[in-house]
Image: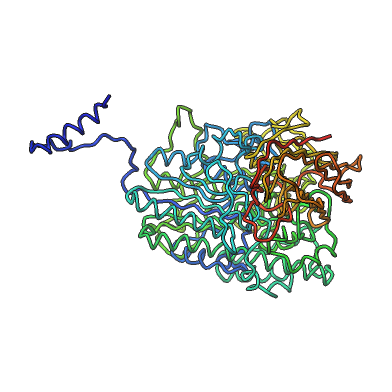
Amino acid sequence: MISALGASALALMASAAFGQAVVPAPATVPAYQIKAPAGAPNVVVILLDDVGFGAASTFGGPIETPALGRLAADGLRYNRFHTTGICSPTRASLLTGRNPHSTGIGAVENSSDERPGYSGFHSKDTASIATVLRQNGYNTAAFGKWHQVPDWEASPSGPFDRWPTGEGFERFYGFIGGETDQFDPSLFEGTTPVMRPDVPNYHLTEDLADKSIAWLRTQHSVTPDKPFFLYFAPGATHAPLQVPRGWSERYKGKFDQGWDKVREETFVRQKRLGVIPANARLTPRPDGLPAWDSLTPDQKRFAARTMEVYAGFLAHTDAQVGKLLDSLAANGERQNTMVFYVFGDNGASGEGGLSGSANYFANIQGLPETDQIRAAHLDALGGPDAYAHYPAGWAWAMNAPLPWMKTVASHLGGTRNAMVFDWPGHVADKGGIRTQFSHVNDIVPTILEAAGITAPSTVDGIAQKPMDGVSLLYSLKDPKAPERHLTQYFEVFGHRAIYHDGWMASAFHSRLPWSVMGFGDKKFEDDRWALYDLGKDFSQARDVADRNPAKLADLKALFDAEAARNQVLPLRNTTLGNNKVPSIAAGRTTMTFHEGAVGVPETALPRAMNRSWSVDAAIDIADGAEGVVATLGGRSAGWSLYLDRGGKPTFSYRVFDIEAVTLRAAQSLAPGKHALRFDFDYAGPGYGKGARLRLMVDGAVVDTGEVKSSPTAFYTIDESFDVGLDHGSPAGSYPAGTAPGFAFQKGRIEQVTFSAR
């Protein structure tokens, strides 16, 4: 049966064929697609990760950032722009225009709990800007880091409505968690795990830039009149600090003077550039953070090298942003594109600890590296064989002149970031500086005002919360315009602050930013509140609480009101592992998987840390079979059961840079069915103990070994359990020349059972 539309088309063709008059198409076409408002600009939002206010040369820092500088010369630098103090809440606030707890993401994803403000996912009454723009005629795409999916929704079973493609982005290419290996990332295309391109000298940031550019070119070719929204959020410069070696070599020897001196030098340049006022003070080193001169020569060498790597990493990232901006100009799209370049989702990170690390996840879990281990990895820093992070002293230096660093939401070193905003043809004084208070939640209202789109009262039938941010367009024309964002609260891990009309009250809680797992149980009523007059004190250098008790009392009351309004309350000392949140593996000690199960989060498996566990695999192979049978974790730490080249069953186990053991059968497997088993017999009770290791083939022990330690909490945060492929960085010592993932071939994996005992 021919449809009505098909019949009409056939009738027109028949009429034309027999010389009859053809009725012209109607002058108007039904609006099958929504068109964006006339003149609506393209929008590019660039968000870097873990970059301090004093890192970029454009803001007086020691690291060259020519792309940021070019954009600033054409646009504006904002020197009182603020983030939330940690990554997930900043991203939620940026993409919704609301305060983070109001969206449900008041804490980093890996510490979500049952409180509404800390649930770990966007509530549907705070729709993303991607959703709003897509429903108003925009194309939308996100490339890079997401970190807005709770652990229990990050598996191949979904649900996927809180992944990027469920939050309004038509295209997503990147990683879902908080960090990833830069040379072998855990990538997703939409919601499907994919391997990185098999190309020489691969690096994730370059890949993300290339994919973004390709998307922009295609979008412009197909629909040149349709505006786009591009969210570019590389994992750089979050740990692991990994970058092509030539970039880190550019900074060889440039940090040998140490963090105290580098911070002082940055402070001088900042004043010379005018990005901080002449009366600003350089805040002192926090208690507990060592002076550079207290380090041993070996400690200095390691610390200086990690900073060289970080500097190269940031410079390399800025160069990829430069490629992206150049592509806009090449496509003729730059003039009608507004760009926000947010230089960090929080202050620089102290998570590398006081000494830094060649593999910082060990230190986080109470398995600290020795100076000897760090020294042995000096030449590997920045490369694929190190999962490095710099010492916390460098985070303090990169946040100059501000007092603290990432996670300390009570103070500006945690929450103040550099930002450049440019919209060609709309800036009164190119290269100017804006000093009005601004916040990451101001970006969405700015986009909506520029596009001529009213913030929707409902989205998909759900009533929306009002925006908390304020459009920044008022500041483009007038550098002295009175600021409009008058009140803003901050809270992360109990550190909290309230800004109002030039004043800030700040309460440092208990957790030191270089003690990642040390949350403590200090009572909130015991916290001391400090008071700062930011109109006269740019860097929070002078606590004036004793002279202004009434002002402090007013601000504390305002914090309480804002905290109640935004789902910040009740305040609670953070705990990990005991929160009342869903768990895929709850109550299960055994799980069976089949070939093709890829990208299963470690948190979805039965809990196996600090206890014995086993892996059983049933395979059916042909001659020449090889590849991964099952794996968990990655290059930083983890294990892999695989058939080596030649078909020999092999098991690799790695405990960060502390220990690595490989068990291997002496004989290759004959074609046919086989049963492989690995036993990890824990030497507990207690945490982080060693184990006896045993590899078996068809019921017979073929190799044994032992380790003296094991991870206490996890192998890596964002690697996965996979069957038939090693998604992300390699957990095994695979043969040279194998393609990324070392996929199982010439056989079939019938099942793999993981059991905790």
**In the displayed structure, does residue 374 sit left or right of residue 731?**
right
Q: Is residue 552 above or below residue 274?
A: above
**Residue drawn where x is 45% and y is 30% of the image:** 460
Percent position (x, y) of residue 273? Answer: 55, 69
**In the displayed structure, does residue 300 sit left or right of residue 39?**
right
Percent position (x, y) of residue 29? Answer: 23, 36
- Whether residue 551 is visible to the viewer of this picture, yes or no, is no
- Whether residue 168 is visible to the viewer of this picture, yes or no, is yes
Q: Nearer the viewer, residue 195 or 747?
A: 747
Percent position (x, y) of residue 67? Answer: 50, 65
Q: Nearer the viewer, residue 77 or 503?
A: 77
Q: How many marks?
A: 0
Q: Is residue 25 above or below residue 257?
A: above
Spot the residue most to the top: 1
**Residue drawn where x is 46% and y is 55% of the image:** 339
**In the displayed structure, does residue 53 sit left or right of residue 429?**
right
Q: Nearer the viewer, residue 415 or 375?
A: 375
Q: Is residue 745 above or below residue 160?
A: below
Quadrant in which the C terminus is drawn: top right
